[in-house]
Each structure stands twice: as C-alpha cells, then as structure tokens.
Image (spheres, helix red, strand yellow):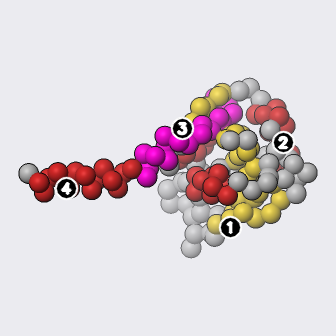
C-alpha cells in the first residue's frame, strides 16, 4: 500500500510544474479566419503546451495586425496577443514561454510567411523549412529571436 502511495505522490509531483504553468499562464487571444486549418493547428499546439487560448474568427485579420502593431512585412495568417505582446504567424510555444519569462522591451514575435514545419504547418512526409522567429519593435525593427534549421 505504501509503495502505491509513494508512486502516486511522485506522479503528482512530476505533473505540478505543467499544472502550475497552465494555471498561471495568461490567455492568448487569437484572431483568425474561420476557415483556416493551419490556424486551428497552431492553436492546438499552444494548448498542448499549456496555454489557454481564446480563438476569435474575424473577417479581416489585417485589421488586427494593424491594431496590435505588427509591421505589414511580418504578416501571416493569424495574430495572437498575450500579456501585451503580439504574436504573428506560427510562433512556437517554447518561444512564447521564453518571451514571457524574459519580458524584453518589444512589440512581439513573428514568424513571417508560413514556413513548412513550423507549429501548425507540419505535413507528414514533407521536410521542415529553415525559419526565424523574429522579435519586433514598435518601429518595425527586428532581430532573430531564435533560428530553426531545416530538416535534413
């Protein structure tokens, strides 16, 4: 009996960091087209990584990019907002977690275009493209926040 109790306690302890992250995590509001499958896949990626997401189907995603200060050159198919930061395109959850932990002075993160292999853009049998997650400022200046190499 004691062994079962100890194993149960260990399992619960291992799950606590994930449960704590999900409970304390701010909500990501995502503005997307109702018919976009890759946006739905990106939202699933975020939820699988502990984020709570409120999806909003909108007729014009460009209006939200403008509203949240995403430079036109960085545009993609959906815009997210979390804790004052804009998220444009298929930004990996790990980079969003890093952004929230580091809290850099920036407007947000973007993955311009729709690179194959980025979260929500995975296609079985297709190699992943190399792509950059860009940190962007209100003035439109960017720097590479993280680089993802192409699959070999």
Q: Name the residue tied to disc 4.
A: 6
Q: CA distance from mark 3 to mark 1?
A: 25 Å
Whether residue 78 is visible here, answered yes or no, is no
Identified at 65% across, 35% down, the residue is 29
Q: Name the residue tied to disc 1.
A: 147
Toward the viewer: 85 or 30?
85
* Mark 3 or mark 1, earlier in chain: 3
Q: CA distance from mark 1 to mark 4?
A: 42 Å
Secondary element at tag 2: loop
| Image location of residue 84, percent across then percent down | 73, 41
| Tag 2 and tag 4, C-beta contact below 8 Å | no
Whether residue 69 is visible here, answered yes or no, is yes
Secondary element at tag 3: loop
| Tag 1 and tag 4, C-beta contact below 8 Å | no
Q: Residues within 10 Å of mark 1 (few under 14, many from 20)?
A: few
* Mark 1 or mark 2, earlier in chain: 2
Q: Which of the two marks, 3 or 1, is nearer to us in this view?
A: 3
Q: Which of the two marks, 2 or 4, is nearer to us in this view?
A: 4
Q: Which of the two marks, 1 or 2, is nearer to us in this view?
A: 2
Q: CA distance from mark 4 to mark 3?
A: 31 Å
Identified at 84% across, 42% down, the residue is 69
Q: Which residues are magenta?
A: 17-37
Q: CA distance from mark 2 to mark 3?
A: 23 Å
| Tag 3 and tag 1, C-beta contact below 8 Å | no
When the figure is inspected, residue 58 is found, relative to residue 72, above or below; the finding is above
**Residue 133, image quadrant:** bottom right
* Mark 4 or mark 3, earlier in chain: 4
Q: Name the residue tied to disc 3.
A: 52
Identified at 28% across, 53% down, the residue is 11
Q: Name the residue tied to disc 2.
A: 69
Left or right of 109 in this view: 3 = left
Toward the viewer: 106 or 62?
106
């Amino acid at each position: 009996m004691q062994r079962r109790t100890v194993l149960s306690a260990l399992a619960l302890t291992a799950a606590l960091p994930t449960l704590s992250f999900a409970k304390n995590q701010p909500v990501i509001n995502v503005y997307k087209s109702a018919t976009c499958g890759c946006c739905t896949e990106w939202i699933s990626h975020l939820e699988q990584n502990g984020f709570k997401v409120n999806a909003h189907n909108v007729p014009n995603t460009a209006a939200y990019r403008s509203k949240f200060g995403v430079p036109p050159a960085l545009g993609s198919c959906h815009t997210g907002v979390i804790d004052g930061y804009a998220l444009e395109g298929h930004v990996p959850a790990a980079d969003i977690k890093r952004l929230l932990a580091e809290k850099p002075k920036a407007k947000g993160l973007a993955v311009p275009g729709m690179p194959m292999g980025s979260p929500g853009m995975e296609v079985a049998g297709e190699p992943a493209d190399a792509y950059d997650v860009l940190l962007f400022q209100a003035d439109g200046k960017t720097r590479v926040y993280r680089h993802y190499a192409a699959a070999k």
